[in-house]
Amino acid sequence: MSDPILVTRSSMPDYDEYISEIKDMWENHWLTNMGPKHKQLQAMLKEYMGVENVDLFTNGHMAIELTLQALNLQGEVITTPFTFASTTHAIVRNKLEPVFCDIDPVTYTIDTEKLESLITDRTCAIMPVHVYGNVCNIEEIDRIAKKHELKIVYDAAHTFGETYKGKGIGSFGDASCFSFHATKVFNSIEGGAVCFSNPSLGKKLYDLKNFGIHGPEEVSAVGANAKMNEFCAAMGICNLRHVDEEIAKRKAVVERYNSHLSGVDGIQLNAVQPDVKSNYAYYPVVFDEKVFGASRSEIFEKLAENGIGARKYFYPLTNTFSAFHGKYDVNQTPVALHISKRVLTLPLYADLALEDVDRICEIILSCKK
Ligand SMILES: *Cc1c(COP(=O)(O)O)cnc(C)c1O
């Protein structure tokens, strides 16, 4: 049998490139606390992402959690349950109440037609997710937020390197939070970033990631420790040099999948968004058992038998987590529930061989009845 294929595989620079990047750390002994690598990566990212401001964090989750804290919010935050645990947890850990809006059946992002009816006098913010790298309905979210004076914080963990109508995807809303986790399109081992336009938000975030320390003798907020260390920043610097090649290779993998799976009855592929420069982050496939003849779970098992790791991503929905003890009604988000029961994300990473894509698709299509 062939070697197992995992759903993802972390991008890494050549060993020698990383070693030469970290070499000067043995001279300056500066390992963390916004050192030279941190500053260099920050400057490189500002340029690459095409944003006014970017700050770095230890991971994407703390980027989101501290952004909500920095905005001084109270009350309800409208979000979607079709996402990674982090989005909902960041809201709850800030003692805010998540209010779950359903998703659009094509882009899987927040359904802006259902959004406005969820706004109450306790709503303080909207936290939409650019899920799988699919960009939310930005104009409509802006319009609604402006009308009701709500903050917008995007969970942009999946959209590194994307643009919308030619602008960096981090330029929208009050803030956009990115993840540089090992499994993401761009990684700094673990890492995260917040893009924002208001410099006063930036100052608060800068303090919050370092315990709320504002000066040598002043601690002005109850912050956390969420600083990116120098080894992670160095990994980010190296990976950023190659990220365009990595995205191009991902594109070739996606096109190979499409060549086998598009037009197959009972299979819904990810939507192509004309105004978006995509990063090819994920390859979600939604299976309609009645038409395709096999269920998502059968296909998942069949792939597993062949050493291929697909993922039920995102299943379960965050509003069904046992952590919340049945507090939320999943029937409020029927489209999200429907998609979460039928979706599989297929293996996708830059170095996935196109012959392996052929084999994965052959196995999937062999399940069709
Ligand atoms: C990965 C991810 C996060 C959290 O990022 P970490 O860097 O792992 O903390 C948040 N939201 C979404 C949608 C993610 O996929």
Image: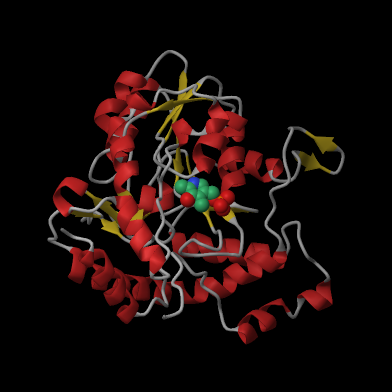
| Tally of marks | 0
Query: Where's the C terminus, which quadrant?
Result: bottom left
Does residue 229 sit above or below 120 in this rendering?
below
Residue 332, by quadrant, is: top left
119 and 196: which is toward the camera: 119
Is the residue 243 above or below the residue 217 in the image? below
Relative vertical location of residue 277 with respect to residue 64 in this rendering, above or below: below
The part of the image, by quadrant, that contains residue 236 is bottom right
Residue name at image x 43 percent, y 43 percent? 83
Q: Quadrant of the N terminus?
A: bottom left
Residue at point 80% right, 42% down? 215
Q: Residue at x 55, y 75 (%)?
A: 12
Do we see residue 194 in this rendering? no
The percent coordinates of residue 131 (x first, y second) are 38, 48
Is 295 left, or right, of 183 in this rendering? left
Which residue corresponds to the image point at 38% horizontal and 27% vertical from the top-left? 330
